[in-house]
Amino acid sequence: MMIYEPPQLTDEDFAVIELINEQKQKLRYYVQNNPHRWSGLIRRNMMARAIQGSNSIEGYHATIDDVIAAVDDEDPMEATDETWREIVGYRNALTYILQLSEDEYFEFHPQLLRSLHFMMLQHSLEKMPGRWRPGDIYVVNQETDERVYEGPDALEVPKLIDGLIEFLNSPTDCPIMVKAAMAHLNLTMIHPFKDGNGRMARALQTLVLSREGLVSPIFSSIEEWLGRNTTAYYEILAKTGQGAWHPENNAHDWVQFCLRAHFQQAHTVVRRNNWYEKIYEDVKRLLEQHRLPERAISTLMDASIGLRIRAGRYREENDISDVVASRDLRKMSDIELLVPHGERRGRFYLGAKILRKIAANHKVSGRAADPYDLVRQKRQLMESPQLPL
């Protein structure tokens, strides 16, 4: 069965891919030179933001504190039961994807897609987790109640999925980011499940990217970016699909949209790392000044960027006793680095003014440039006539 095919790439597309790869090389350098910090604080936060972004597109909004709690396998602070179940389901699927990224025997298979879907939605059996949809499916605009997309006939789903799997397993010269974008597009348009198709498509894109091996897949994911650009995301899918299953349509605009997302997300991650590095240096000085144990540094960094600190997480990530954890947190409160809130099991800590000021002083705002604009500007400079010396 015919599926959407990768478009013919332009010279501009290849130039943008090169810009993205330059950003990834920076990330690779940070991963290799700061292994402890990347594998801990930043990696956890990046995973949480990917989960938060993908679920927010479907209307499941959770605070970053709650999503980090899900990543750490802790109880939620504010999320409703429904949202919490969706967050945890997506965490389970994404965790499996991260495991598969290092599996030398890995291959794509229809059952893998059904298994990931079951991990996401096993808490809602009415949504038929792990099974292809049995009938027609439509996407409806919730604001206008207008039907905006109709998926292909349910009887065609297994054959279309087989075509997608064949594409994913076949060797190709297609750049990995383009291949991942086409996997995302095809699964979205096939809409093989009764529910959860968008999250599955975004997870599949991350899974395809995870096979690249350049940097950790969680740093290649664009799910956070898509969560921040939901309207544009829906618009480009609508433009590409034109209301129904049209695999003959050109997917070039969609691929360019994803390449922009990759560049801007990578730029955000690089900038975030630089921000964390500066926070780390200032927090480390505070640590030494107050003679706090080295284990407290990641907690104070979390607190500086506005995250809630709980004793259980502090105890477990440092492998210490309740007594030691309580003593450390009490000292950090006494010297006014942390501010306690609540009582007993509901107690948490927020960063005091001095910590929040550290983070604010180093914060850099502003949106990343459009990489296609950067490529065109570079080309114009190269083509402009040079003045004689």
Image (spheres, rainbow, N blue to C red):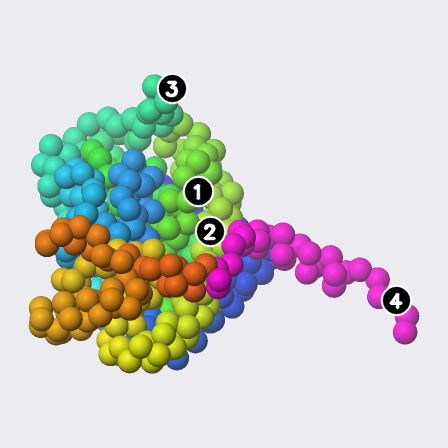
Image coords of residue 183 (percent x, y): 35, 49
Helix, strand or loop at label 2? It is helix
Instruction: Left or right? Give the position of 361 relative to 165.
Output: right
The secondary element bearing badge 1 is classed as loop
Q: Are marks 1 and 2 in contact (CB under 8 Å)?
A: yes
Q: Which residue is mark 2?
A: 261
**Residue 46, percent across and down?**
33, 59
Q: Is residue 237 visible?
A: no
Q: Which residue is mark 3?
A: 144
- Residue at coordinates 11% horizontally, 41% vertically from top-left? 123
- Write the residue at 46% across / 38% down: 232
The part of the chain drawn in magenta is 361-389
Q: CA distance from mark 3 to mark 4?
A: 58 Å
Q: Residue furthest right?
A: 388
Which mark, by number, is residue 387? 4
Residue 229 disc label: 1
Magenta-span inclusion, residue 363: yes
Q: Nearer the viewer, residue 115 or 289?
A: 289
Mark pair 4, 2: CA separation: 37 Å
Q: Alpha-carbon distance for marks 2 and 3?
A: 28 Å
* Left-right relation of 328 to 139: left
Callout 4: SS: loop
Quick one: label 3, few (<14), some, or many (20+) residues within 10 Å? Answer: few
Amino acid type at circle 1 is: Asn
CA distance for labels 1 and 2:
9 Å
For marks 3 and 4, the one nearer the N-term is: 3
Q: Residues within 10 Å of mark 2 (few under 14, many from 20)?
A: many
Amino acid on which the number 2 mark rests in the picture? Ala
Circles 2 and 3: CB atoms closer than 8 Å: no
Find the residue positioned furthest to the front: 334
Residue type at numbered disc 3: Thr
The CA span between labels 4 and 1 is: 43 Å
